[in-house]
Image: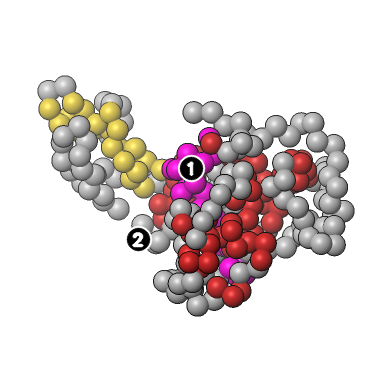
Amino acid sequence: MNMLVTDFDGFTLPECNFIPPEGMEFDCWDYGETGDSIRLSGDMTITAKWWKGFPDVHRGDWFYSAAKYNYKHEFITGYKNGKFGPSDALQRQDFVVILARIADARLDGYTSCPLSDVDINAYYGKAVAWAVDKGIITGYNNGKFGVGDKITREQVATIIYRFMGKPAVSGVDETLEKFNDKGSVSAFAKDAIAWANLLGIITGKNATTLAPTATAARAEIATIVMRMDKAYMFYSSPYSNRST
């Protein structure tokens, strides 16, 4: 797949016509003379950069950039079979694991979790314990976390809102008014989902449908993570240890 890249130090760059390595596709042009290179001027040489891609993610898919961004930053990577699984649901504990990893959370000191269904020795245990400790997760009214439950869009909004320190948000009702399903937003999530929508972190399924209780797919999570990272939220959260 060729791709035209423009505005590289004032140059309009050509399409990449190099044959990519097997299983790879063109990513971008970069400085350098190694590999597949083109000389633009006497002292300007650019090199084609490749990335592996996923067989179920294609250029032109609405989530293509997000899947690629998460892969390159090692936030959300593919399955062992090489696929990304864009339409697959994400479970609650897996989203917390992703959040803790990106935030470089210090997990070593956690030896227990107050939520009754959390196994501290499981792959997710310490991440969930950290999230509970920081007030990012409170769990269900029955004292459980909901291990194995598919995470919903309003739950994602609530978790990232708390992760950001529950910033003040105004115009909640006005923000939600444009969505026909505003009445489906749970009381605990109203501020969070309005905040996320105002910032463009979580948009509607369309102009009038928010789908707060719908399951959040991996493609949606990848898009949310990309938007947060580009807004430097993972650096500014009071619960993040990530450095530039």
Q: Quick one: label 1 or label 2, which is nearer the N terminus?
A: 2
Residue 229 image label: 1
As drawn, is 168 to the left or to the right of 230?
right
- Nearest the viewer among 211 and 16 is 211
Q: How is the image coloured?
A: secondary structure
Main SS category, magenta section: helix
* Amino acid, disc 2: Gly
Per the image, the residue denoted by label 2 is: 60
Residue density around tag 2, few if under 14, some if 14–19, many if 20 or more, within 10 Å: few
Residue density around tag 1, few if under 14, some if 14–19, many if 20 or more, within 10 Å: some
* Amino acid, disc 1: Asp
- Nearest the viewer among 74 and 193 is 193
As drawn, is 188 to the left or to the right of 217?
right
Asked if residue 223 is among those painted magenta in the image, a careful observer would answer yes
The residue shown at (44%, 43%) is 230
Residue 218 visible within the image: no
Q: CA distance from mark 1 to mark 2?
A: 22 Å
**Farthest residue, direction top:** 43
The residue shown at (46%, 53%) is 199
- Nearest the viewer among 95 and 231 is 231
Asked if residue 217 is among those painted magenta in the image, a careful observer would answer yes
Question: Residue 49, how many percent across, how many down?
Answer: 34, 37
* Residues drawn in magenta: 212-235
Viewer-nearest of discs 1 and 2? 1
**Farthest residue, direction bottom:** 180
